[in-house]
Structures are given as C-alpha cells and as structure tokens.
Image: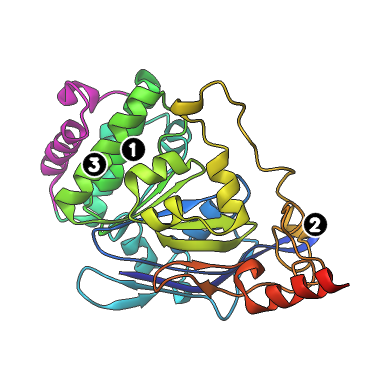
Amino acid sequence: MLSVKNLSISFQTDEGLITPVQGVSFDVKPGRTLGLVGESGSGKSISTKALMQLLPGNSSLSDESEMIYRAKDGSEIDIHKLKKTGRAIRKIRGGEIGMIFQEPMASFSPVYTIGNQMIEAIRLHRKTSKKQARALAIEMLAKVGISSPETRVDQYPHEMSGGMRQRAMIALALSAEPALLIADEPTTALDVTIQAQVLELMKELQRDLDMGMIFITHDLGVIAHIADDIAVMYLGTIVEAGPTADVIHNPKHPYTKGLLKALPSLAHLQERLVPVPGDIPSPNERPKGCPFQTRCSKAIEGLCDQIVPSDIAITDEHAVRCWLYAPEADLRIEERASA
C-alpha cells in the first residue's frame, strides 16, 4: 500500500544545507505493521512527516525521492509530486493516512473541546451531518476505551489525563477510517500499564480495520510486541531491515546488536545495562563512509571509514547495510592479518 524509494530530505539552515535523511527505502503492506527504530535524531519522524507533506518550508526532497501510495479506490499517488497546501494532499491527510503525534497535549488545540476537533476531522473526510459526526466521535472515544464518552467529548484536552489524551488522539486519527496509520512514539510519555493497554488497543483496531501501520519508537521491546517488520534507522539511513523475528533473534548490524544489549532483562536484573558507546553525530557532521563507524568496535580501517556500504541480503527478506557481511571485508581482514 506504500512504497518509499530513495527518500532524501534536506533543510536550508543558517549553517548551510543539511541532509538528515539519505536514501531511505521501505514498504508497508496492508494489515501489517512496520516498526521504525532508532535513537533520537535518526530521522524517523522526519521521514514519516514527509509522507504527510508536513515538513517546514525550508525543507526539500531530492528528485530521486519516490513515495507511492495506493489509495482506497485503488489509484496510485506519488505524494512527492503533490503540493503541500493542495486539495489532493488534504484528502490524504487524515482521510487516507492518519497520524498519532508524539505529544497529544501539543497536538490538540487547547481552546476547542476534544469533540469539536474530532467532529471537524470527521466532516472533512466523511459526508455526515454535524449530529452524525458527533455520534461517530462518541463511538470512537468509546472504542478506544474512554469511559463516559458522552461527557468526555465536551471536555478540553487539559481536563484529561495523559493516557486519556493519548487514547483521544488515537480516536481522532482513526475517526476518518484511514487505510494507513502513522504512530509516532505514541506510548513514550505513558506509564507501563497504560502503555500495554494502548498497544493492545492499536493491535485490536488494526485487525478490525485491516489497516497498515508505521510505528515509530526507540524501544525494541515495544517493537517486538507490535511490529511485523522492522527497519532500524541510524543517522538518516536504514542500516538493517527484515521481519521482526529475524531482526530480533538474529541481528546483524552492530548498531542493532547494541540497541538489543541496552534493553533491561528480567533474567539479569543485577547486571548493568550496556549502552551503545558515544553519541549520534549531527547531520551536518556526517562521518565519511559508514555512518556508524565512529561508534563501532568492529569497524574495518580503510573500508568502513572510507566507503558507504550497500544493502547486503542475509535472507530474501532480511538485509543489512554493513561491510562485515561483504566479501571485501574478508579481504581487508586477511590483508591486515598478513601485514
């Protein structure tokens, strides 16, 4: 339902042109969830905001970028070619592709009730009267597990708890019955109990609506629970991608391995967590060669620090962008050993 190819995003800033996303490609299938994983600054949110044409005015996409979306009516739309303020993209936003933003308190308008904002979205994408739209809003609030939806629909965002606002945000995103849902770290600000409830709710709604989903997070534990496929992002590129079980149980890229080692384990509660060493570089200070080589303990001198690796197939569905799995790496290691 969605095919993204060679997505590169640049921003014109006072410091010059920076490119935080370079050559990103991924597909989303109907009824399946793609998990985008990586540290803050990896380019996850920027990549998905490009799908909604929500990037600021100083941004630009490369000519090679392609974002083909198959609409509900079966037509194929290249989102890259749509105007940011045109009628065509407004039809896609919310109607075809819904989005749950990171912080619902900042996403809802504080001066309108939750119901007012939901009714506006429903009437924008579905042919209903105001009365019917209100009934649908109440129905969606009930579906996401909000008690007394007939009362809550007339409340303002500040009158709700964090978990309730997050559920209301999900209800708003799903009110127009989108075919694809983008969830940008929807559980980050929630406690563990509410987080589990929200994840179960999203899985249930996805099954009911046969909806595709892109789930953005830095938590591989959450991804293992909800995603069918994983794309691991680092410094604006996808370094490993494949089915969730393959990537979690057979990680190949040193960065993916580092993220998994940083997860706490119930079986080893006394052990210290092992963080990924160093910090993610700024996009305007992108290292030469593999973007992860400055933090990688297995970097091959003269190869990883000079040449950007290409995708290497581990299986038909599992690919990694790392020189350790290329024939060139074996040659360099042999040369260093003989020297």
Q: Secondary structure at mark 1?
A: helix
Going 34% across and 23% down the picture, which residue do you hit? 193
Compare residues 277 and 192 and report the one nearer the observer.
277
Compare residues 285 and 245 and report the one nearer the observer.
245
Figure quadrant of the C terminus: bottom right
Left of 169 or right of it: where is 101?
Answer: right
Q: Which mark is residue 119?
A: 3
The boundaries of the magenta stretch are 128-155
Amino acid carrying label 3: it is Ile
- Viewer-nearest of discs 3 and 1: 1
Q: Residues within 10 Å of mark 3 (few under 14, many from 20)?
A: many
x, y percent for residue 103 = 47, 35
The residue labelled by disc 2 is: 14
Q: Secondary structure at mark 2?
A: loop
Taking the view exactly as shown, the residue that stands out farthest to the front is 338
x, y percent for residue 169 = 34, 37
Left of 36 or right of it: where is 87?
Answer: left
The residue labelled by disc 1 is: 169
Amino acid carrying label 2: it is Asp
Q: Earlier in the sequence, mark 2 or mark 3?
A: 2
x, y percent for residue 39 = 59, 46
Q: Which mark is residue 96?
A: none
> Does residue 175 appear anywhere in the picture?
no
| Spatial CA span between label 2 and label 3 | 41 Å
Q: Earlier in the sequence, mark 3 or mark 1?
A: 3
| Spatial CA span between label 3 and label 1 | 13 Å
Q: Residues within 10 Å of mark 2 (few under 14, many from 20)?
A: few
- 308 over 230 or under it: above or below: below
